[in-house]
Image (tube, rainbow, N blue to C red):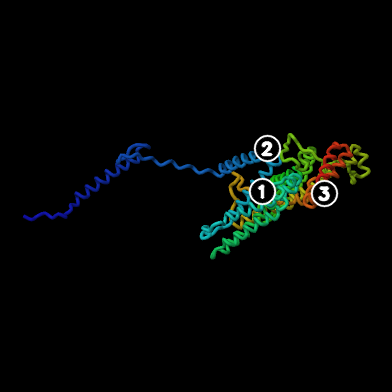
Amino acid sequence: MARPRKDVKFAHRSASNNRARRASMSMSEISESGSQPGSPTRNGTFEKSPAPPVPEQSEYEKKKANFIVRTTWTLVMIGGFFFALGAGHLYIIVIITAVQVICFKEVIAIANVPSKARSLRFTKSLNWYFLGTAMYFLYGESVIYYFKHILLVDRILLPLATHHRFISFMLYIIGFVFFVFSLQKGHYKFQFTQFAWTHMALFLIVGQAHFIINNIFEGFIWFILPISMVITNDIFAYLCGITFGRHQLIQISPKKTWEGFLGAWFFTIIWGVLATHFLAQYKFFICPVNDLGATVFSGLECVPNPVFTARTYTVPFIPEGLSAYLPVLPHTVDILPVQFHMVILATFASLIAPFGGFFASGLKRTFKIKDFGDSIPGHGGATDRFDCQFIMGSIAFFYYSSFIATHHTTVGGVIEAAITGLTYDEQFEVVQILAKNLVNHGTIAPQILDYLNNLSAHAVKA
């Protein structure tokens, strides 16, 4: 009898077995796919059903959400600005400082960093070191200039004030030497590019922010009006552009039109004249800072600049015959001289400041980015919002210094000249002479002068 072969397969059995397996597998798959979330599967585990796909937002919904976020943060920024304005000059200076640091960070961050250069040490540290050095120098210059009568009579602050520029220069030299020591073969081009890029950012951002802070020290009006003019210009450039715009202004910003450009100029002048008339009525806005703790409730006291005193001007272009038909037409008007200056500054805000935005647009196109960052939700980066403000602040400072500022002797200037240019004996002699003058005018008691003369006599005997 022949032995059966082990490897013989029966087609009909295998086919039937395969069909049975397929049926059982399909049933299990059906049961598993049809099970509810959290129901046990064949192996005893719990399986979660996949979440339903989230429907994509339509273009309208995206624009609506962006509009809500943008509007919300606009109101938050406006509210914060007015709160800081009422709280005093120091709060506004803190805000300007924060803005310039954020803008510096955004501008530095857009530079392309090759992958092989990311392992370099001290690259970012040097950027922030140069920023700190520049801010120390520029802030120190402003504080010493406006508060020298406080700094120069303090024993600790006197050396820092008198040698401020040398200290600042040595801090920069330390950073420069450290940069040279950090150079590595194969990375020279990248490191020198970063060095130049950092200095450009310091010049365009920190340097111009310094002038804005000086505007604050000269009086809030020289800070409020320039920035409000830029905002007004932006608003009306958009409104006039979408209403009348037909002719493109510049290729870098294709949406800018000549009609929006000129319409914004007109409305910015109107805003400048009206806002100046309102702000000039309050010394808190027109007085230079002599107390950093002053608020809108405590106010400031000073002798106002002559440009804030109204003058009478004769209207020269009224025809003689017209006055007979319009007897109520005034022949003279009372205008603040500063309002004429604001017409010029409004012209700068409309014709020159927008080129700060054009420059920023060109920079973004160079690096193929939409915004400098996302520091302000709905608005992009801080640089996107303040690109025009920096150049306008510089224009306002130089215009004020050249045509409006009154140059006269100040207490700080006299003290600086006495401390830095006279010996101690000469300074004491000046004090005696001033005391004698005050006694003659009845301001101080004669005993004070006698006391000073006795001190002088004892010093001579010693």
Residue 363 x, y percent position in the rendering: 63, 56
Q: Residues within 10 Å of mark 2 (few under 14, many from 20)?
A: few
Q: Nearer the viewer, residue 131 or 190?
A: 131
Label 1 or label 3, whichever comes before in sequence order: 1
Query: CB under 8 Å between callouts 1 and 3?
Result: no
Residue positioned 27% across, 46% down in the render: 22
- For residue 144, side relative to residue 181 (left or right): right
- The amino acid type of the residue labelled 2 equals Phe
Q: Residues within 10 Å of mark 1 (few under 14, many from 20)?
A: many
- For residue 101, side relative to residue 406 (left or right): left
Q: Nearer the viewer, residue 264 or 432?
A: 432
Q: Quick one: which residue is furthest to the front in this view?
A: 461
Query: CB under 8 Å between callouts 3 and 2?
Result: no
Label 3 or label 2, whichever comes before in sequence order: 2
Q: Secondary structure at mark 1?
A: helix
Residue positioned 65% across, 53% down in the render: 133
> What is the C-alpha distance between the residues marked 2 and 1?
19 Å
Residue 247 visible at all: no
- Disc number lying in front (2 or 1): 2
Residue 17 x, y percent position in the rendering: 22, 47
Q: Give residue 266's mark.
A: none
Q: Nearer the viewer, residue 2 or 83?
A: 83
- The amino acid type of the residue labelled 1 equals Phe
Give the labeled residue for mark 2: 83
Give the labeled residue for mark 3: 407
- Disc number lying in front (3 or 2): 3
Q: Nearer the viewer, residue 383 or 258?
A: 383
Residue 74 x, y percent position in the rendering: 64, 41
Label 2 or label 1, whichever comes before in sequence order: 2
Q: Give residue 386's mark.
A: 1
